[in-house]
Image (cartoon, helix red, strand yellow):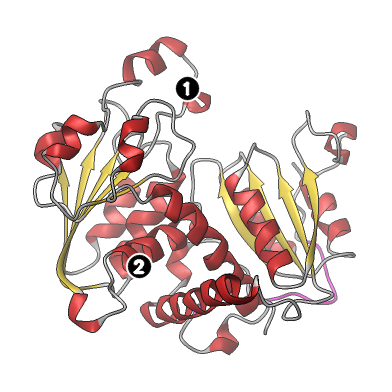
Amino acid sequence: MSLDNGDHQQHQTPLRTLTEDVNSWNKASLLSVSQITAGGLQLLFQRSREMRRLVRENGGGNHLLQHKLLASVFYEASTRTACSFQSAMMRLGGNYLHVEGHYGGNSSAAKKGESLEDTIKCLECYVDVTVLRHPVQGSVEAVIHMANKPVINAGDGVGEHPTQALLDVFTIYDELKMHEAEQKRSHLVVVILGDLKHGRTVHSLAKLLCTSNIWQESLTLRYCSPDGLEMPPYVQHDCAQHEHVQQETIHHLRTAIEGADVLYVTRIQRERFDNLDDYEKANGSYVVDASLMENAPAEMVVLHPLPRVNEITTEVDADPRAAYFRQMENGMFVRMALLSLILGV
């Protein structure tokens, strides 16, 4: 991968701070949740609720992004992220080009040896914004530094997945009815379960929860994972910088969910393991089933970024606390809001 920060006629300022001022979002790239202030998050959530209303009442806002094009560039497999960005663009009257960037893909010049840099430069000739997923941590940041148009991080290796965290926190905000002032939690307890080492979704989620204003007095993050798959020290260090944030490591799931407001479940990521035996040892360590839910707090929300393997049994799907499919639908609304802000409508 060649990423030469050569001369360009136009360069957007990378890693702009995204605030409650709509102008701060216009033509901005999104690499990390750390760019978004509490006020910026509230702006995005307000816009997301507006997008949900648009879809449910009118099917979308057909002219908001008319004649706008998105490049959907994925060097790793994706179903939900790719489809929700594409549907978000189309619901707002825009369109998209999809590129399967990995070597097995049938629509990328990477098969011919083209660099990531050249691929993005070429696509910028056609589109207004690029959504990029790449297996190498740091690759999306390098692209943002050389890009002339907005780039949205859709996952960079085991780094971050900011739009997933945005839809996750929006779902927490929505499920717990935090848009109603009297429902705002003074103390919020979130259990994060599964492969916390490789799970870029939980890295972004933990960081965003710390900087959000959906809790008032304190936030408790409880980490529950198999041995060797703990939350990375750098994520814990970032969270420790925030006042009134407590981090706990609890290995027993039934203990971890006591008094919890949210249980966020992730799968053990087989594709991140070099040794299959290590994967088999970790897989199935924790299972959320009907028995666990019987003893869980009555209003505890269960989330999962999906896909799931065997960490949540299908019998849990009928439980009203299981919000993971509503979470997926929220992904489209949040990405509609994000695209509308970045493209300046």
SS category of the residue bearing label 1: loop
Mark positioned earlier in the residue sequence (1 or 2): 2
Quarter the C terminus occupies: bottom right
Whether label 1 touches label 2, CB < 8 Å: no
Whether residue 264 is visible: yes
SS category of the residue bearing label 2: helix
Camera-side mark, 1 or 2: 2
Residue at (61, 79) in percent of width and height:
341
**How far, Cα to Cα, is label 1 from label 2?**
35 Å
Quarter the N terminus occupies: top right
Whether residue 312 is visible: no
Quarter occupied by residue 233: top left
Residue type, mark 1 in image? Phe
Rendered image: mark on residue 273 = 1
Quarter occupied by residue 312: top left
| Front one among 160 and 263 | 263
The kind of secondary structure the magenta stretch mainly shows is loop
Residue 45: image location, x then y, percent:
44, 75
Q: Is residue 313 above or below residue 13?
A: above
Residue 93: image location, x then y, percent:
76, 72
| Front one among 58 and 148 | 58
Residue 77: image location, x then y, percent:
64, 36
Residue 29: image location, x then y, percent:
63, 69
Residue at (55, 41) in percent of width and height:
157
Magenta region: 6-18
| Front one among 30 and 181 | 181
Q: Is residue 19 left or right of residue 231?
A: right
Instruction: Check disc 2: other Cα within 10 Å, few if <14, some if 14-19, many if 20+.
Output: some
Residue type, mark 2 in image? Asp
Q: Is residue 336 left or right of residue 272?
A: right
Residue at (85, 40) in percent of width and height:
108
User: Where is mark 2, residue-wise?
Assistant: 174
